[in-house]
Amino acid sequence: MNINDYVIPFFTYLQFFPATLLCACAAKNHLKYKPSVIVLRMGVVSIIAAAILTFLRSTVSTDFRLILLPVLLAVFIVFHGSLTIPLSQSVSLFLLVAAFTNFLSNFSIIYDALLHPDGLLINFSAEAFILQLTLNILFCILASFPMKKYGAFLIDNLQQSNVWWISAMVSAVFFIFNQIMTIHKYNTLHVNRVGSAYISVMSMLFLLLILLCLVFYYIVTALINKAETEDRNRILEMQEKQYDSLQQYIAADRQARHDFRQTIYTLKELSSERDYESIDEYLSSYIEALPKKEVTNYCRDNALNALLNHYAMIASTNDIDMDINIYIEKDLLIDNVDLCSIVGNILENAVLACADVPEEKRFIHVVISLEQGNELYIAISNSFSGKLRQKKDRYLSTHKSGSGIGLISITATAEQYGGSANFSHADGIFYSDVLMINK
């Protein structure tokens, strides 16, 4: 064996490096370390992995694919450890890029087979290596933009792990297929029309994988947009209800002011007669007739104000003692749909939880404050029956079938704003604590 038998395989396997960086592009908003640190980590791991695979390729006689998988797993572990996204998302990303790069590898092998009809894969030529390197670099450059824009959008907004696991399974099928279909003896492609059929199948599957990515993106985008539209509509409905209540209050208040002149005349007449008992009764009746204010101005954010009034009304109807304390001295930069989605999800869960508690023990405490300039804290506690469903560290819904998607959505939204969400319980009280950066 000569030096090329080591150099070409080494640089071939070193292409793990741009591939893993391409995966990280989609998770750009969820990096655990600085980009330079992640580049260094993945570079070192890729060099070590390439060196190990090169050595084993030249010394181990067994099926090389059995060696490749553990090394790929090690690279993935380092990759996943550099991000803060769930395992389902990182597995899906990694397998998708691995499937695409496997296609490019097989296209390079086809090219090598055309150049050397009687050759073997183990003798992969320098010409084919240059083509593979060019295809991989070109693919990573072209795919980096959609990964940063569209892939990042999906990572940030699609939090249903089961959808990501299904996506990972599809990518795994393509990856395994490419591994099985790898040609080791080039003369196989030159028998009858095997070569043309193989090229056609690989090309169609490559295009199919691209098409599936596009379909997946557009379907998920449509679902996300629909959910956002429903959230906006719900906020608008609550604002409309609060607006109607305010209009009714204003109309009643106008009528009361209009009648106030007659009230003065009546009081003056009773006063002149020194009929103080009648004056007292008249004033009591007048106070009872005054319009009761139904809209409370909790904060300057109209959407959040409408939401809080809406749930305050629900709490009052259900005999829930609800107190709301808002400490926001300046305008919020957080999108009010995101903010109302978080607060609304928590309050909805709190109202449902209080329904299982005796009336005298029902309460919801709400504190929303902007501290240290740009840190928005949302702290909501409520009574609950003590019955909970949990899966590991995650709370599940107790009132309907499902897996507590509301809490997952809260966490995902908080993380979009550089914050976090924590949920806990103790002594019959459930605590929801959310931190968001006001940006």
Image (cartoon, rainbow, N blue to C red):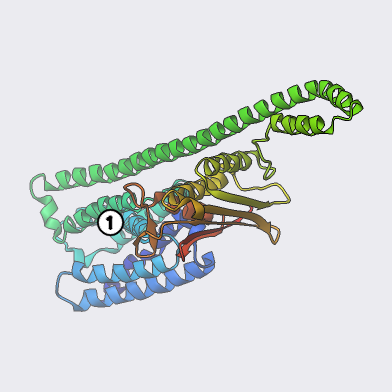
* x, y percent for residue 111: 25, 53
Which residue is depicted at the point 54% across and 46% down? 338
Quadrant occupied by the N terminus: bottom left
Q: 184 or 395: which is nearer to us?
A: 395
Residue 110 visible in the displayed image: no
Q: 97 or 312: which is nearer to us?
A: 312
Vertical relation: 274 (above or below) 426: above
Which of the 4 image quarters holds residue 436? Answer: bottom right
Q: 299 or 419: which is nearer to us?
A: 299
Vertical relation: 390 (above or below) 331: below
Q: 392 or 41: which is nearer to us?
A: 392
Vertical relation: 252 (above or below) 120: above
Amino acid type shown at disc 1: Asn
Q: How many numbered marks does the figure carry?
A: 1
Residue 425 visible in the displayed image: yes
Query: Going by the image, does 206 lie left or right of 296?
Result: left
User: Which residue position holds label 1?
Assistant: 102
Query: Going by the image, does 277 lie left or right of 114?
Result: right
Query: Going by the image, does 374 lie left or right of 268?
Result: left
Which residue is depicted at the point 37% across and 50% down? 160
Callout 1: 10 Å neighbours few (<14), some, many (20+)?
A: many
Which of the 4 image quarters holds residue 204? Answer: top left
